[in-house]
Image: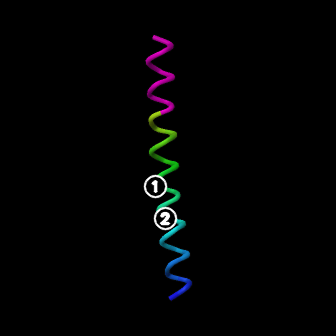
Amino acid sequence: MAEADTYARKVMNMRVWCGISHVVARNAGEERT
């Protein structure tokens, strides 16, 4: 149970970071244009 919880947290963190980096990259691209 503890392992599944840790895995779920890792997946959530990865998805959050992917979303954040995507937004940052999009904002940076808009600023450059």
Q: Residue at x 47, y 21 (%)?
A: 29
Q: Residue at x 49, y 42 (%)?
A: 20
Distance between mark 2 and mark 1 Cα atoms: 6 Å
Q: Residue at x 54, y 66 (%)?
A: 10
**In the rendered picture of this protein, how many numbered marks are placed on residues?**
2
Q: Using residue 10 as the reference point, say whether residue 23 is left or right of it.
A: left
Q: Could you classify mark 2 by the number of other residues whose Cα lies within 10 Å: few (under 14), some (14-19), or many (20 or more)? A: few
Q: Residue furthest top?
A: 33
Q: Could you classify mark 1 by the number of other residues whose Cα lies within 10 Å: few (under 14), some (14-19), or many (20 or more)? A: few
Q: Position of residue 23 (x, y in %)?
A: 45, 35
Label at residue 5? none
- SS state under label 1: helix
Q: Position of residue 19 (x, y in %)?
A: 44, 45
- Dot 2 amino acid type: Val
Give yes or no for contact between labels 2 and 1 (Cβ–Cβ under 8 Å). yes
- Asked which colour scheme the image uses, the reply is rainbow
Secondary structure mostly seen in magenta is helix
Compare residues 6 and 33 and report the one nearer the observer: 6
Which region of the structure is painted magenta? 24-33
Q: Is residue 33 above or below residue 3?
A: above
Residue under numbered circle 2: 11
Is-magenta flag for residue 27?
yes
Is-magenta flag for residue 32?
yes
- Dot 1 amino acid type: Arg
Q: Position of residue 2 (x, y in %)?
A: 55, 85
- SS state under label 2: helix
Label at residue 15? 1
Q: Position of residue 30 (x, y in %)?
A: 43, 18
Q: Is residue 24 above or below residue 5?
A: above
Q: Is residue 15 above or below residue 1?
A: above
Image quadrant occupied by the C terminus: top left
